[in-house]
Image: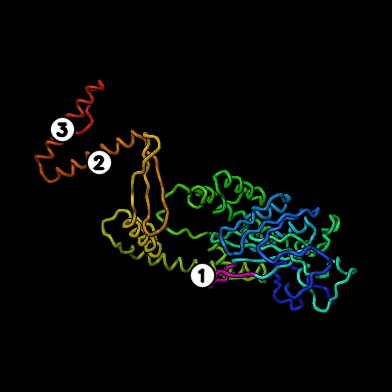
Amino acid sequence: MSQVEPAAAGADQAGEGAVVPHDEGVGGGGGVATTEAQVAVAVSTSGDERRVEYGDDADNEGEEAATVQGSKEGTEELLRKVVYSEEAAYKLYCDYGHRMGFSIRKGKQSYFTGTKRIRTKDYFCSKEGLKEGEKLTDANFNDPHTRTNCRAMVRFRVNDHGEWKVIRLVSDHNHNLARPEERHLLRSARSLIAGRSSSEAMVYAGYQMFTKCIQGCDSETEFEETWAQMIHEFKLQDNKWLKKLYKLKQKWCSALNKRTFDGGVEYEPQCDSMSNIFNSVADKLTSLSAIAVAVDKLSEDWREKELEEDTRCLQKPPACIIKHSDILNHAAKVYTHRIYKLFETDFLDGCGATKFKELPCEDNNTHQFEMTMQGRGSRVCTECMDDDAAYCNYVMHYAYDLVTKSQGQEELRKALWETLENGEKELEKYLGNGTQYAPSYAA
Ligand SMILES: [Zn+2]
């Protein structure tokens, strides 16, 4: 039986010894030969094709697959879309393939150095490669189970933010594509439906949307829309945890914090820490119920550690490195020892390395300030202040300076106070107001 295994979800191609690599194969059937690499080709179903070369260096971050012109909607969507997991990437290409009329198999992947995090992942047309010992004939060439050394493929690359984007697309096939009425019979379409329980698919879709809410939205509107869509689609209107989370959205939604000065504290993407948790308890073959049990056990361990930390914290607060800092003292009161130490390190680093300067503004009525964390790159926040606020600021500094100068010398303090009181009297006289607000120093 020479039938090739269906490209079931989770199955990798690596084990299939019967596949002849591309370069040894014969381009059968008089199909369109595709240049091996770095060519993004968009082919409409009518066979009209356009190619865009985008350089030799496939690892160049600047390379843009999305510049293909004149492609059909589906191809454009595939090139534009950002997904957040291997499963979602596979599904995206499957959806594309089924619309076009071909089936998909999973290809090789590369990892970020020293990690198990996927960096690139290839997916092929299921007729990729050649089957050993199988002769290509006119009769079997367009049989769905025959491998024809088709080179159609897609390559996703994952960036540091966990975003999966298409960086290479070869959309020429050297065989006929399935007609619309045959498409539901495509292998990967069937395995997508059969090989994956609907609950599993739901979990992935929900997880993807949730991740997008946390860090994948560019604007508040996009965040609100995605959140509403997630609540609606998964019928989560009554979920207390999500309701509470939504109230705290300012604290965790990246789209709402674009203008917040974060002092350069490294932001650990939620999806990374989430996937680290899941990677530690499960792999591709772990069943959903086994994952649930493992996560349960893991959270039990966490609760135990929390309890230990609680006990430790109740005994005495952490020792502050600066005795009279209100901020540190407050942090020592509200944080656990461990979190306090993290906070203290960042706080001290921040104190010593923050630079503050006024920027020239286009109109003369506003004042803009820039805060920079030295040594931590470009985290900058600018705030505009209008003229009144700037004047106020200036006067307060001036007054503060005078108070400081007069410190410790009774005569000077008295003189300053009298001057201020006189100033106040003059003001009130001018404003026609009899009341005097400052309590007299002399009294
Ligand atoms: Zn193909």
The quadrant of the picture occupied by the N terminus is bottom right
Q: Give the residue type that dot 3 points to.
A: Thr
Q: Which amino acid does label 2 sit on?
A: His
Q: Dot 1 lies on which element?
A: helix
Callouts 3 and 2 close, C-beta under 8 Å:
no
Mark 3 and mark 2 lie on one chain; the one further toward the N terminus is 2
Residue beneath disc 2: 397
42 vs 118, left or right, is right
For disc 1, the marked residue is 301
Mark in the foreground, 3 or 2: 2
In this view, 118 is above or below 63: below
Determine the quadrant in which ligand 1 lies.
bottom right
Q: Distance between the residues labelled 3 and 2?
A: 17 Å
Residues under numbered marks 1 and 2 in contact, where contact means CB atoms less than 8 Å apart: no
Give residue 419's mark.
3
On the rendered image, what quadrant is the C terminus found in?
top left
Which residue is outermost to the top?
A: 432
Percent position of residue 310, x then y: 41, 64
Closer to the chain start, of discs 3 and 1, is 1
Q: Is residue 425 visible?
A: yes
Which residue is at the front of the view, 404 or 282?
404
The spot of residue 362 in percent (x, y) is: 40, 37
Q: Position of residue 332 (x, y in %)?
A: 34, 59
23, 274: nearer the viewer:
23
Q: Nearer the viewer, mark 3 or mark 1?
A: 3
